[in-house]
Amino acid sequence: MKNAALIIVVLFQSIICYGQDCSKEFTGKILDFHDGVPLNNATITFNNTTIKSDKQGNFKITGLCPISYAFTISHPDCNSQVVTVDISEVTNKVIYLEHHYSDLEEVTLETTNEIRDTNSQTEDQLSKSDLEKYSSLTLGDALKEISGVTSLSSGNTIVKPVIQGLHSSRIIIMNNGVRQEDQEWGEEHAPNLDINAFNKIRVIKGSGALQYGGNAIGGVVVAENKLTSLKDTVFGRTQIAASSNGRGGGASASINLGFNKGWSSKFQTSIKRFGDSEAPDYILSNTGVSEQNFSAGLGYTGFTGGLELYYSFFNATQGILRASHLGNRGDYARAVNSPVPLIINPFTYDINAPKQETQHHLAKIKGYKRFKNLGKLTAQYSFQYNNRKEFDIRRGDDRDKPSLDLDLFTNALESSFLFDANARFKKTVGFQLTFQENIPDPETGIKRLIPDYKRVQAGLFAIATYDLKDNITLDAGIRYDFVNIDAKKFYDKDFWEDRGYDTEFNDLIIADEGDQWLTNPVLDFHSFAISGGLNFSYKDQDKFLINLSLANRAPNPVELFSDGLHHSAAIIEIGDLRTKQENALKLSLSNESHKLLGNDYITISPYVNFINNYIFLEPSGSVELTTRGDFPRWEYRQTDAILWGVDINYGVDLTENVGFNTGFSYIYGQDIENNEPIINMPAPSFRSELIFDQELWNLKLVNTTVLQQNRFPDNNFTDDFIEDGAIQTVFVDVSTPPKGYTLFDLAGTYKFSLWNTEDLSLGLTITNIFNTSYRDYLNRQRFFADNIGRNFTLNFNFKF
Amino acid sequence: MKNVTLKYLTILFLSITVLSCSDDDDPAVINEEETITTVKLTVTESGSTTSTEYTWTEDSQDPITLQANTTYNFTIEFLDESNPDDVEDITAEVIAEADEHYVFYENTVTGLVFQSAADDTQDSNDISINVSTDWTTGSAGTGIIRAYLIHEPTTKTGDSRADFGGETDIEVEFTTTVQ
């Protein structure tokens, strides 16, 4: 299209040109827009003639007629630009080229080029083709491909990412440039976002990416899908997946439109519907899922400025294993000690209580402006509304009422300035202002697990990278955050005294409500984060990274205020008003070497993380008698912890068409104050792939092997029951992690060319080929049921 | 395009409204209902009209005293007394939803046995749900009686709590003396 227009202009010019005084000269200079550096070897093309700029960026064209010419200016590192010049009026011009092509980054559907977010942190990324395989699954499932990333799940649909042993509030998830605020503190709260909405997901294994936040002790997941910068284009895809396990599937469609003059837009939608999943030996009753998502973006991606509007909507209903909803401690003991779930019903698509219904709206407006010889200013306002309803099994009129109904509103305003005039020494400064309000609906009739609160966060950061040499880049960053939490919380008077709050916090009481106090805790936290590191390239492709990061994390609402019964764990969780900030110091190294034994590479990434005031939940040893029965009481406590581990990746091209790669992760977590292992640390695991890649088809055999976690704290308890007229004691082991397991998956894809090359691909994936029964330590339903069994998924993917 | 803009504006407007409206209103207090705070056993000796009430609450549990080699009728009541001015009788609900409920007793007193009474409530499958039960004592002894209200039991036949499945709505214990 663009080329056609150009040819017409050129032809037109040639005709007019004929018979004129064509001895005009056009001179000029081609410079980098950002730093004014002259661009050597830029090409200027017109009328089949090509001229190159010299080292000073100068060029000179002779023999021109006094008319308008369209010159195409190109440089290997830049976006091409067409400049129209009327030679009768202009004979000299300075032309600026956009030298940061990666910033505009054309949205090709398969991005393979590695663009890093940080200089010295260990990072990994998944491309669109990696993500496509998970279109009917979740973000948490896809991220498990990355070594060092595991998942904390509640069944097979509620999956949270765990980065090097840390999860929930210790991880930031960036949803298209906005920090996702979706009640992420809960262990059974999966990220409320649709994996199909993204074309690339990066994982930063540490807190050093200070532009996103200062409290990501675990790391950052950056999920994005940029607008296309291609002009006059329409492209998109449709994907349909059908699975045998759960007897359901998903469909998603997206369309990207690129208009003239830099305007573009995109639309994406997806749906998912599954019934009960099946373990090898039984139906996992009430584990269905229903999900509907939509997103739309519109923007102008220009040379000196741009604007983007984005909206996304997520709506999901997720069933929770029926057998995991427990009435009291005796039920819990029986459920844990039973080899099969105590409730197994025939397969159904119905999703009944216990279940979760979550909705997430995200809207943002973002703009940027580039300044000559200075840098780029970015500003963004975002709004998020999250609603979470959790349904327990209830009685009578309350049968259909949720037990928990939370509205979370988050408004964020942020801005940053990137100084990149000196390409060797780039600096970014910025701020973020966040206002958040949580409103639990009292209509539930159940005391609020999380109170009403308002939270203000103000953050300031400065980061810089400096190229010491061509192959050595240093980075440093500093960030300060002020966090203010203003809560209104009811406390049972007995509980208030029992916790000793009456001696410390009586001034927080604002009203007397019978057997409850209404209190107004106002808490301030000052958090500092510092990060520094080095990126050293050597030999051809080898690389060494070292990073040291210090981060503070203010406690989240659940750690401060939680006070209630968790049915799925049959425990009462108690937060503590006195909870202090966590302080983490993490040292990470990474070394990537290529061509050791052939066409291969190995990446070894060890790390050590010292966390002071590590917040965790542990049994208090007391049993609380409630009107439903007795429940063990678990309390949030703080200790000093050390987490160290290593992630290793090895990959080799065995032949031109056969590749093998394997990843291994090990993590050691220890409570150094009490000298005992930290609960829920991922077990050592291997993930290996054997890939056959032909022009039209590929086949992948994947093995996942997880060893048994041998390091765990002892939280076992005993319960009594009556048998033959006598009280018997039963031992309930809730501590010993399940045995290790090994699983094989096979995935094949065949590509067809219908209207365009390889526009249709059909795939078949079989997961858990041998229908192995297994349980995973980080699945909260492991006490009650096996993980899902064999699953066939048929995939249809059409691009246009 | 217009719709998208409209949507943004609507959301923005709503958020501002919600945030500004909710300012400084104290949240409403929640007094949890639908809990069973009290379990009452009314024990009547066979052939007699006088009965004794034994009450279980979180804070106090009455000990039961029975005579050896005697027959009694037990009726069980589940009450929500969390609001003393508005006591709710959950038993009515249990009876109305007889299909989903079952009362089960276990005890450790030698010779003490029970069966459902003739006036007991039956579910749609004609299974008595043990709201009213007949008990027979043996010789003197001590032990406990444990009562369960089971919600959605997987079966209504069995000898121990584990046989019934379902969820325990409430589990209470009375120390018992047969003299």
Image: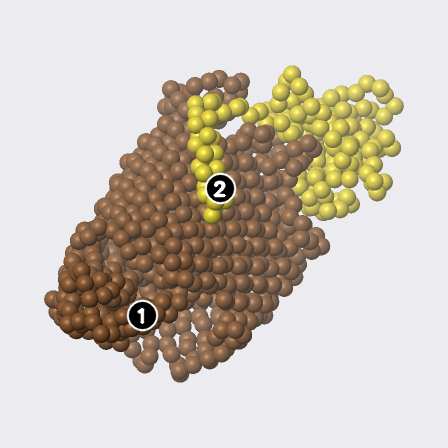
Residue B125 location, quadrant: top right
Q: Position of residue A68 (x, y in %)?
A: 24, 64
Q: How is the image coloured?
A: by chain
Q: Residue at x 66, y 57 (%)?
A: A283
- Same chain check for tags 1 and 2: no
In the image, is residue B76 above or below residue A554?
above
Image mark for residue B7: 2
The secondary element bearing badge 2 is classed as: helix
A757 relative position to B65: left or right: left
Which chain does yellow denote in the image? B
Q: Residue at x 69, y 46 (%)?
A: B165
In the image, is residue B164 above or below residue B17?
below
B132 relative position to A662: left or right: right
The secondary element bearing badge 1 is classed as: helix
Q: Position of residue A574 (x, y in %)?
A: 47, 35
Comparing A737 with A768, the one in front is A768
- In this view, the residue farthest toward the front is A19
Asked if one can make out residue A652 in the rendered structure from this viewpoint, the answer is yes
In the image, is residue A300 above or below residue B77?
below
Q: Chain of mark 2?
A: B
Q: Position of residue A417 (x, y in %)?
A: 24, 47
- Look at chain A in the picture and name its colour: brown
Q: Quadrant of the N terminus of chain A?
A: bottom left
Q: Is there a contact, CB below 8 Å, between mark 1 and mark 2?
A: no
Residue A50 location, quadrant: bottom left
Q: Nearer the viewer, mark 1 or mark 2?
A: 1
Q: Dot 1, crowdedness within 10 Å: few (<14), some or many (≥20)?
A: few
- Residue to which mark 1 is pinned: A12
Q: Residue at x 56, y 61 (%)?
A: A774
Q: Chain of mark 1?
A: A
| Type of amino acid under label 1 | Phe
The tally of labels here is 2
